[in-house]
């Protein structure tokens, strides 16, 4: 069963909306699809989860993200999460179909999900958009290597949709994120990054609120724009002062930092020193592959 779904996930044609809205689509959708095509299903799920909670997604974008998530979960033999993603699609488009290009077993699974969803009164279909979930968190300062990091977060969930708050973290900038559930406490939620994973030059992480089916609802940071903790003792460029004081913007897999460099220099004479010229903006690209 898994082999059949792998073929489907790699060869499934793009939704027709790609031709209708080619200019401004969420770039993480294409990235997640490419990862699925390469059979990197866990990475694809992380990327698509980030895409889902980004602002500006159209209805068709959301349907496409849920569809790809469902196929990834199905390929990994995680039917509960696959069903959750498909239920989210059906709530947006009750007549949704996967098309004839998908393996019969996958279409049968969608039919079974649809029957259960309809028998339960089509949950999720509503005239009112749900209230936004807000995750409040402040990143800690630099840490020493080998010291566990305790992270605190609070969640404002007006409609009580969140089931779990997940911490995703990794050492450095290349590894696949590890995911652990945060624990509730009197102030909200706490999660600990183990000491063994706190090594120079940095640790990247983000928080993700998920529903009872594991579908992302909101995030603080994400796989493409994570929060960061500098770890002392590293000699990487990522621990330099300008990396942490620049304004970081993630663009197509790279981190673009807008750095303000002061243009100094004397006047070369004996007269009064003129005021310095306006700071010159510079852009430094740090590729994060």
Image (spheres, rainbow, N blue to C red):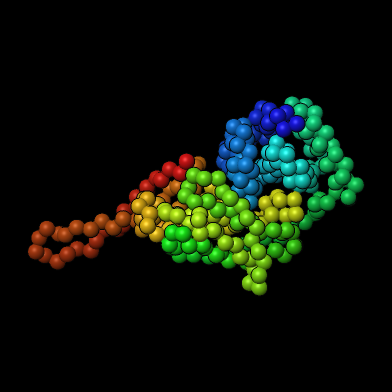
Residue at point 81% right, 36% down?
A: 109
Tell me which corner region of the image, top left, top right, bottom left or bottom right, holds residue 202. bottom left
| Residue 261 vertical position relative to residue 3 in the rendered view, above or below | below
Foreground pick, 224 / 186 = 186
Foreground pick, 289 / 136 = 289
Residue 226 in the image, given as x and y percentages of width and height: 52, 53
Residue 223 in the image, given as x and y percentages of width and height: 56, 48
Residue 254 in the image, given as x and y percentages of width and height: 46, 44
Residue at point 60% right, 62% down?
A: 191
Tell me which corner region of the image, top left, top right, bottom left or bottom right, holds residue 111. top right
In the visual, does 147 lie left or right of 87? Answer: left
Q: In this view of the protein, can residue 18 be seen by the observer?
A: yes
Label count reads 0
Q: Residue furthest left?
A: 270
Q: Residue furthest right?
A: 119
| Residue 19 vertical position relative to residue 119 in the rendered view, above or below | above
Q: In this view of the protein, can residue 228 be seen by the observer?
A: no
Residue 100 in the image, given as x and y percentages of width and height: 77, 26
In the visual, does 183 lie left or right of 279? Answer: right
| Residue 115 vertical position relative to residue 276 in the rendered view, above or below | above
In the visual, does 129 lie left or right of 279? Answer: right
Specify the quadrant that holds the N terminus: top right
């Amino acid at each position: 069963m898994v082999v059949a779904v792998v073929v489907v996930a790699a060869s499934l044609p793009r939704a027709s909306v790609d031709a209708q809205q080619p200019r401004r689509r969420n770039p993480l959708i294409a990235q997640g699809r490419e990862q699925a095509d390469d059979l990197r299903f866990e990475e694809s799920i992380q990327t698509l989860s980030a895409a889902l909670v980004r602002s500006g997604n159209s209805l068709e974008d959301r349907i496409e993200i849920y569809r790809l998530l469902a196929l990834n979960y199905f390929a990994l033999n995680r039917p509960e999460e696959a069903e959750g993603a498909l239920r989210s699609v059906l709530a947006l488009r009750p007549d949704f179909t996967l098309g004839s290009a998908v393996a019969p077993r996958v279409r049968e699974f969608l039919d079974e999900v649809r029957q259960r969803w309809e028998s339960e009164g089509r949950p999720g279909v509503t005239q009112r958009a749900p209230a936004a979930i807000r995750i409040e968190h402040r990143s800690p300062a630099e840490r020493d290597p080998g010291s566990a990091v305790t992270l605190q977060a609070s969640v404002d969930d007006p409609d009580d949709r969140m089931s779990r708050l997940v911490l995703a973290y990794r050492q450095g900038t290349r590894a696949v994120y590890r995911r652990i559930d945060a624990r509730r406490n009197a102030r909200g939620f706490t999660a600990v990054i183990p000491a063994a994973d706190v090594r120079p030059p940095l640790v990247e992480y983000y928080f993700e609120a998920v529903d009872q089916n594991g579908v992302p609802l909101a995030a603080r940071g994400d796989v493409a724009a994570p929060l960061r903790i500098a770890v002392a003792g590293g000699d990487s460029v990522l621990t330099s002062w300008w990396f942490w004081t620049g304004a970081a913007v993630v663009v197509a897999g790279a981190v673009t930092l807008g750095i303000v460099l002061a243009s100094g220099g004397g006047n070369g004479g004996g007269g009064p020193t003129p005021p310095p010229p306006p700071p010159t903006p510079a852009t430094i690209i740090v590729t994060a592959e």
